[in-house]
Image: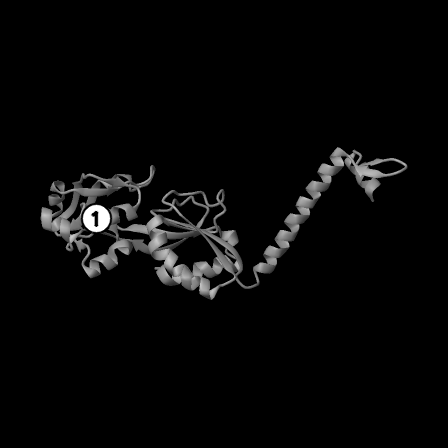
């Protein structure tokens, strides 16, 4: 069989002497490549077996910082209890990392998804925001009663990533009330690229912030922050759960998609 293979390939795979045989340089490379192919075949067969089994393996997830830390991470505790054989690899970032290049099974993204995207998008509940400040700040600087009053206040702004469709929303706060749409150009002593930084500054009485409801809800309920302009509605950001269609057959991914859409789907 070996000589027939050499004849078909047109090269020698073995160096033959009367005392021993060993692989040629090409034979070594050919053998290693065959091992790689056999490994891929074994992985493919294992993948087919997993598709019909219990959720297992590593599930690699990426999500925005605030949603990931305040909403997703706590929910993963129960998911892990239900599926103990799934190891979670969570990457939190406001950058839109390429799912394929970075090996992600699933991503949660804010904003609109291009129609040309090859990913399957499952809509989740919209990402909502609140304008608020600490009681201490309001006691020292007064409470704004109309959005235009924000021009006279120290407004702490979020620095959206380059290319984000909300890039200008950091310093242009838009809201809608009985008097229609209002767009206020705000300014202040701090800009940050994480909601957590703005949150800590606001709680310390530094200024007025626009932050995700998921981050400030408990502080609003317990009085550490005060919501402003309750009669105005702020823009909502669509939120989607994304994955590659051909990977949905994997139990680890399918179980997570069903779990997440059960919690936050719409």
Q: Choose between 126 and 12: the one closer to the eye.
A: 12
Q: Number of marks in the image?
A: 1
Q: Choose between 264 and 77: the one closer to the eye.
A: 77
**Label 1 neighbour load within 10 Å: few <14, some 14-19, many 20+:** many
- Which quadrant of the figure has residue 219? bottom left
The residue singled out by tag 1 in the image is 202
From where the camera sits, is residue 212 visible? Answer: yes
Report the coloring of the rendering: one colour
What SS does tag 1 mark? helix
- Which quadrant of the figure has residue 95? top left
From the top left corner, tell me how far across and down residue 238 is, in percent: 32, 51
From the top left corner, tell me how far across and down residue 37 is, in percent: 67, 45
* Residue located 21% across and 61% down the image: 221
Quarter of the figure that contains the N terminus = top right
Query: Would you say 262 lies left or right of 220 here?
Result: right
Quarter of the figure that contains the C terminus = bottom left
Establish if 9 lies above or below 77: above
From where the camera sits, is residue 235 visible? Answer: no
Query: Would you say 211 lies left or right of 83 here?
Result: left
From the top left corner, tell me how far across and down residue 230 is, in percent: 16, 55
From the top left corner, tell me how far across and down residue 3 is, in percent: 84, 40
* Residue located 18% across and 45% down the image: 206
């Amino acid at each position: 069989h070996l000589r027939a293979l050499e004849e078909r390939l047109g090269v020698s795979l073995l160096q033959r002497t009367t005392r021993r045989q060993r692989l040629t340089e090409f034979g070594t490379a050919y053998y290693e490549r065959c091992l790689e192919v056999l490994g891929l075949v074994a992985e493919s067969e294992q993948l087919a077996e997993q598709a019909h089994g219990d959720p297992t393996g590593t599930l690699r997830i990426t999500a925005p910082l605030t949603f990931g830390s305040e909403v997703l991470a706590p929910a993963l505790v129960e998911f892990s209890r239900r599926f103990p054989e799934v190891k979670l690899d969570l990457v939190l970032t406001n950058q839109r990392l390429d799912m394929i290049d970075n090996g992600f099974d699933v991503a949660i993204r804010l904003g609109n998804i291009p129609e040309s995207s090859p990913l399957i998008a499952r809509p989740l509940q919209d990402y909502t925001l609140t304008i608020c400040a600490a009681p201490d700040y309001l006691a020292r600087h007064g409470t704004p009663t109309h959005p235009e009053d924000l021009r006279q206040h120290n407004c702490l702004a979020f620095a959206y990533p380059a290319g984000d469709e909300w890039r200008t929303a950091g310093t242009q706060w838009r809201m809608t009330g009985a008097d229609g749409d209002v767009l206020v150009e705000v300014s202040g002593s701090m800009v940050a690229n994480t909601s957590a930084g703005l949150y800590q500054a606001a709680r310390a009485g530094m200024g007025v912030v626009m932050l995700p409801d998921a981050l400030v809800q408990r502080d609003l309920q317990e009085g550490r922050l005060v919501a402003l302009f309750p009669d105005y509605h702020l823009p909502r950001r669509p939120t989607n759960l994304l994955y590659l269609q051909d990977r949905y057959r994997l139990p680890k991914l399918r179980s997570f998609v069903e779990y997440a859409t059960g919690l936050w789907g719409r």
